[in-house]
Image (cartoon, rainbow, N blue to C red):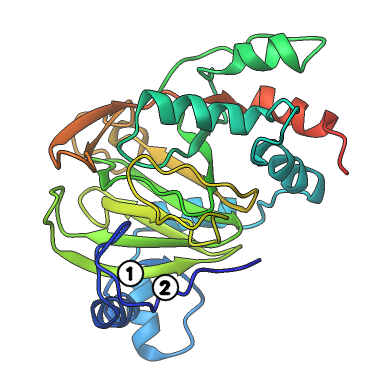
């Protein structure tokens, strides 16, 4: 896979940083206490960084440690992400990206797959891909989500409120910027990279605000940003868990917040609210990936 050289000086999307700022932010991420990512410490300083990671987070990371996408699932996702070819119908995931880009051009779209509950585009799967369709139960606010990040696509700056959770990289590469608050000009705390098997976390106000980006080659000559839609089948995928405060043994009385997250719009730089509907349910996507014939 081709990876964009993130050391090139830039103040453009997605992170609006120069080369020197990026270097400083990566060093800051490495030194942060508690650690931004969960890892086996190899030094005394590293032990202290990991010691301060909350036990509830460590438990989630341990449970997710062995999760992987199979070769069939990975290549089938790539098949359904392919750019539109002349005379051919786009794959399901490409169709979803195209539709989401029409609905909201403020940032390049990515795909949320609910491990419990329904997806907004499940009916497309029923109509075009599945001979037998059993509607999943549930609605928005799934506690476990698979997210598919097409090359050069990214999220807006967003907050996960008072949830406790993890981001576990399944395949590809993700660059994540941690912010000190939810605002367009918020302080950048640290920039780090997740590769398969690595896990980042958040709890309450700690690391709750971030932006996620897939740095792979988007197959275009234009730079990423609002309105961007790539021409590549390259992607990263991550598994996310978000638990409300009421679901923890350390419940502190805060209101549940998984159903709605706040974010900063990339075009007008104002704070808005996103109800956490998913695009597909895993129940449906798994069937499609298993039935996809690979080239």
Q: Quadrant of the N terminus?
A: bottom right
Name the residue at 70% across, 9% down: 127
Residue annotated with mark 2: 6
For residue 72, which numbered disc appears in the image? none
Residue in the foreground of this view, choosing between 244 and 127 = 127
Which element carries disc 2, helix, strand or loop? Answer: loop
Q: Quadrant of the C terminus?
A: top right
Expressed as whole percent of the image width and height from the top left, the position of residue 63 reads 58, 51
Expressed as whole percent of the image width and height from the top left, the position of residue 100 reads 45, 27
Q: Is residue 132 visible?
A: yes
Q: Residue furthest bottom?
A: 43
Query: Taking 236 as reference, is 125 left or right?
Result: right
Name the residue at 34% across, 41% down: 107
**Whether residue 214 is situated above or below residue 243 in the rendered picture:** below
Residue annotated with mark 1: 191
**Whether residue 265 is situated above or below residue 135 in the rendered picture:** below
* Dot 1 alpha-carbon crowd within 10 angstroms: few under 14, some 14 to 19, many 20 or more: many
* Dot 2 alpha-carbon crowd within 10 angstroms: few under 14, some 14 to 19, many 20 or more: few
Q: Is residue 141 visible?
A: no
């Amino acid at each position: 896979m081709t990876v964009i050289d993130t050391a090139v000086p830039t103040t453009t999307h997605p992170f609006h940083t120069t080369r020197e700022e990026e270097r400083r932010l990566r060093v800051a991420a490495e030194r942060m206490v508690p650690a931004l990512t969960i890892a086996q410490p190899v030094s005394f300083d590293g032990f202290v960084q990991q010691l301060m990671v909350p036990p509830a987070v460590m438990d989630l990371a341990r449970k997710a440690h062995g999760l992987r996408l199979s070769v069939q699932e990975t290549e089938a996702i790539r098949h359904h992400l392919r750019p539109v070819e002349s005379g051919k119908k786009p794959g399901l995931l490409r169709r979803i990206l195209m539709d989401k880009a029409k609905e909201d051009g403020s940032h390049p779209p990515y795909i949320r797959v609910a491990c419990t509950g329904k997806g907004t585009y499940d009916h497309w799967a029923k109509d075009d891909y599945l001979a037998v369709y059993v509607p999943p139960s549930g609605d928005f606010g799934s506690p476990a989500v698979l997210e598919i990040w097409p090359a050069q696509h990214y999220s807006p700056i967003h907050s996960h409120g008072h949830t406790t959770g993890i981001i576990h990289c399944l395949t590809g590469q993700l660059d994540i910027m941690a912010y000190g608050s939810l605002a367009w000009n918020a302080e950048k705390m640290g920039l780090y990279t997740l590769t398969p098997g690595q896990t980042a976390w958040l709890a309450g106000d700690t690391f709750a605000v971030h932006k996620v980006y897939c740095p792979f080659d988007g197959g275009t000559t234009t730079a990423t940003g609002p309105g961007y839609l790539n021409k590549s089948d390259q992607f990263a995928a991550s598994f996310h868990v978000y638990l409300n405060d009421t679901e923890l043994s350390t419940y502190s009385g805060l209101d549940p917040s998984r159903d709605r997250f706040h974010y900063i719009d990339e075009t007008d730089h104002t704070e808005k609210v996103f109800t956490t509907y998913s695009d597909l349910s895993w129940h449906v996507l798994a069937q499609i990936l298993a039935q996809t014939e690979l080239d």
